[in-house]
Image (spheres, rainbow, N blue to C red):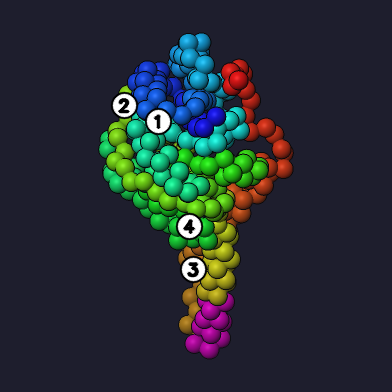
Amino acid sequence: MEISIVVPIFNEEENLPTLYQRLEEVMEKLAVDYELLFVNDGSSDSSIQILKEYASKNAKVKYIDFSRNFGHQIAVSAGLEHAKGQAVVIIDGDLQDPPEIIEPLYKKLKEGFEVVYAQRISRKGESVFKKMTANVFYRILGGITTVHIPVDTGDFRIMDRKVVDVLLAMPEHNKFIRGQVAWVGFRQTSIEYHRDERFSGETGYTFRKMLNFALDGITAFSNFPLKLVTFAGFFVSSITFFIMLYALYSKYILKDFVAGWTSLMLSVLFIGGIQLISIGIIGEYISRINNNVRNRPLYVIKEKKTD
């Protein structure tokens, strides 16, 4: 098997016919042995029925059907575990990432690179808010991590089998695959492309999911939030110490002390706020440790056809 194409699917019934057709055309043009591995991440529409129909007519089409929605990154991880190709492509099912880019990605891989990722020049059909938050997130992440995670990239990429094997040996539950790929190293390069707007339907990536995804990325590859908590603790303690000295000076030297609760309340609220933020940040890390210690499976498969 030369190439496996892993496609996570969540409520993409309207996009699947066009996606399947374009993937078939691209792979027939490449003229290599391949498989199309779709991972149905608990879709509530007829996506799995469509995939079963394709699989019954085409032996190159494989599918994994989850028992419920486990999330995009978990779906990709399941695809990587079951992919048999010497090279593996990850591409979303909404057609924002053009399947035609697979050809230049594969040609670049054959030049001797182990990872070739698709880097966005533009993003059509996305709100200003989403573009702005994504831009800010990746630049902040790049600034606080020791691993260089390329900006303006998603999971759309092609990887050599040796890279996939390393990824499968990384057992953490809170997956941030693009960060993990950057962490493993090897020879990596990029292909630039214009990202299309969603072909049909609505995105399943809500603001809450994007926020959780951002937290996974930051906590998986940076200890900066914990260091920030430490610095904040020292900073608040220093301010509190000087306020205490000033209060003693005012009372016993200046004799200008006015009894009241305003300054006390402000100090208590300020210090209490810092403490709550600190506990919350530490709690995020502890929660992720807890997820890994429980050692539950990443996903549950309801049905599959991968042979």
| Sooner in the amino-acid sequence: mark 3 or mark 4 | 4
Tell me where the magenta segment starts and ends, as one range. 240-254
Q: Quadrant of the C terminus?
A: top right
- Marks 3 and 2 close (CB-CB < 8 Å): no
Residue corresponding to mark 3: 263
Q: Residue at x 45, y 43 (%)?
A: 110
Q: Residues within 10 Å of mark 3 (few under 14, many from 20)?
A: few
Q: Real-space Cα distance between discs 4 and 1?
A: 31 Å
Residue corresponding to mark 4: 148
The mark closer to the camera, 3 or 1, is 1
| Sooner in the amino-acid sequence: mark 2 or mark 1 | 1
Amino acid on which the number 4 mark rests in the picture: His
| Sooner in the amino-acid sequence: mark 3 or mark 2 | 2
Q: Residues within 10 Å of mark 4 (few under 14, many from 20)?
A: some
> In the image, residue 112 lies at what x, y percent?
48, 49
Residue corresponding to mark 2: 199
Q: Is residue 194 visible?
A: yes
Residue corresponding to mark 1: 30
